[in-house]
Image (cartoon, rainbow, N blue to C red):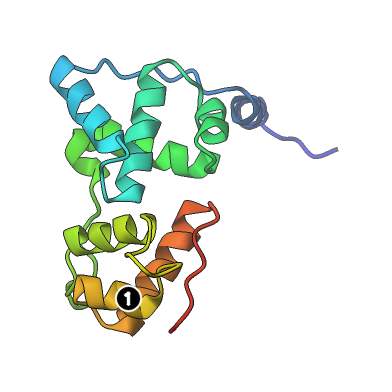
């Protein structure tokens, strides 16, 4: 038999128990202004879907949901919930926004993308049966390839079936 110090074994057992227990971390105490700002960020009017999710994670946490409950409710992973809770704990609402990334900055602003997605989900123009990528490009002033790229990216993010776009 190998002689293992009891403290190491006891610590290991505690870690294992903690891993399988629901999070008992204290829910954040939100100020009224923080709650208003988080509700605004979580609203469907916000063009940034990732930011919507992050705000909803913090709001569910403030409502008393465990990490597993939040993950199930918001259809995301427990790891994502944990990541954004800790970022909020460390930096507040500002920590929920994307950090700067390497590479060239975006050449298309969020408002243009929101306009494209709004048009895509609206009824087609008079005399047309559906929106095509060419029609969307003409209405938004973007190139057809840019419209296709944005539509594909948003369809992947939303996990919901979107209107199928066809070139033409």
Report x, y in % for residue 129: 45, 67
**Image point 61% across, 23% down: which residue?**
21
Q: Residues within 10 Å of mark 1 (few under 14, many from 20)?
A: some
Image quadrant in which the N terminus is located: top right
Residue at 35%, 83% in the rendered image: 145
For the residue pair 145 and 11, the one nearer the viewer reads as 145
Q: Is residue 70 left or right of residue 20?
A: left
The single residue placed furthest to the front in the displayed view is 127
Q: Quadrant of residue 5?
A: top right
Left or right: where does residue 143 sit relative to residue 1?
Answer: left
User: Left or right: where does residue 21 sit relative to residue 120?
Assistant: right
Question: For the view shown, which residue lies furthest in the right direction?
Answer: 1
Q: Position of residue 133 (x, y in %)?
A: 38, 77
Up/down of 95 relative to 38, above or below: below
Q: Is residue 48 above or below residue 130?
A: above
- Residue 94 lies, in percent from the top left, at 17, 40
Q: How many marks?
A: 1
Q: Using residue 93 as the reference point, say whether residue 160 is left or right of it.
A: right
Instruction: Say which of 43 and 60 sits in front.
Output: 43
Tell me the quadrant of the picture where the C terminus can be found: bottom left
What residue is shown with label 1? Answer: 135
Q: Nearer the viewer, residue 75 or 10?
A: 75
The answer to which of 159 and 53 lies nearer the viewer is: 159
**Helix or strand or loop: what does disc 1 sit on?**
helix
Q: Residue at x 35, y 49 (%)?
A: 50
Q: Position of residue 26 (x, y in %)?
A: 38, 16
Q: Is residue 38 above or below residue 152?
A: above
């Amino acid at each position: 038999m190998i002689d293992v110090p009891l403290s190491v074994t006891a610590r290991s057992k505690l870690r294992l128990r903690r891993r399988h227990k629901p999070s008992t971390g204290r829910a954040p105490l939100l100020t009224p202004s923080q709650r208003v700002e988080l509700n605004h960020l979580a609203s469907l009017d916000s063009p940034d879907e990732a930011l919507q999710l992050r705000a909803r994670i913090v709001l569910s946490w403030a409502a008393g949901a465990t990490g597993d409950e939040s993950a199930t409710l918001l259809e995301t992973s427990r790891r994502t919930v944990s990541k954004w809770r800790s970022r909020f704990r460390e930096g507040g609402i500002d920590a929920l926004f994307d950090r700067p990334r390497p590479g060239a900055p975006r050449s298309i602003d969020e408002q243009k993308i929101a306009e494209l997605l709004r048009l895509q989900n609206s009824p087609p123009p008079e005399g047309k049966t559906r929106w095509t990528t060419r029609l969307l490009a003409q209405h938004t002033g973007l190139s057809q390839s840019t419209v296709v790229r944005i539509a594909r990216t948003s369809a992947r993010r939303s996990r919901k079936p979107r209107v199928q776009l066809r070139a033409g």
